[in-house]
Amino acid sequence: QLQLVETGGGLVQPGGSLRLSCAASGSTLEHYSIGWFRQAPGKEREGISAISSRGNKTFYADSVKGRFTISRGNDKATVYLQMNSLKPEDTAIYYCAAVRGLVVTLARGMYNYWGQGTQVTVSS
């Protein structure tokens, strides 16, 4: 059974950077497309980035395009989200999720496996 664990969250000042990691256990991620989602207090969970199982396709929500970068680790068991130029509105719990196959989407209903989330707070 695939399990996902997110790490790398924390408190950062506006304009700063963080790198989130999504680590898999129980399976590698090479046959799974991976999405990053976030949920701010009082708001719905939104998809912000996704990467295909082969790593050749990436998607970004407009709110993070040009600031965030999703990538796969060489170990085939980790996916990263590099977040630069962070803004207070990026404050949220960040989740990674996986779906087996070639679909690449920001639609949360398509994902079968979810991590527990990591808190990102952007504040001065």
Image: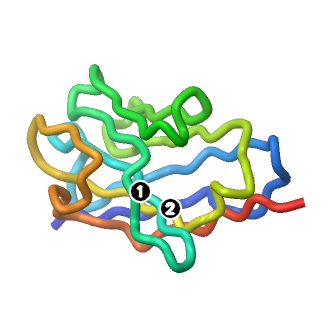
Q: Quadrant of the C terminus?
A: bottom right
Q: Residues within 10 Å of mark 1 (few under 14, many from 20)?
A: many
**Which residue is label 2 attached to?**
94
Total tally of numbered discs in the picture: 2
The span from disc 2 to disc 1 (Cα, nearest Å) is 6 Å
Asked where in the image residue 25 lies, by quadrant, the reply is: bottom left
Q: Which mark is residue 78?
A: none
Nearer to the camera, 72 or 90: 90
Residue 62: horizontal and vertical position, in percent? 47, 36
Residue at 45 percent of width and 35 percent of height: 70
Lateral position of residue 11 relative to residue 100, left or right: right
**Which residue is label 1 attached to?**
37
Residue at 55 percent of width and 60 percent of height: 7
Q: Reply above or below: 40 against 65.
A: below
Q: Badges 2 and 1: C-beta atoms under 8 Å apart?
A: yes
Residue at 68 percent of width and 46 percent of height: 18
Kind of residue at disc 2: Tyr
Nearer to the camera, 3 or 84: 84
Nearer to the camera, 48 or 51: 48
Q: Secondary structure at mark 1?
A: strand
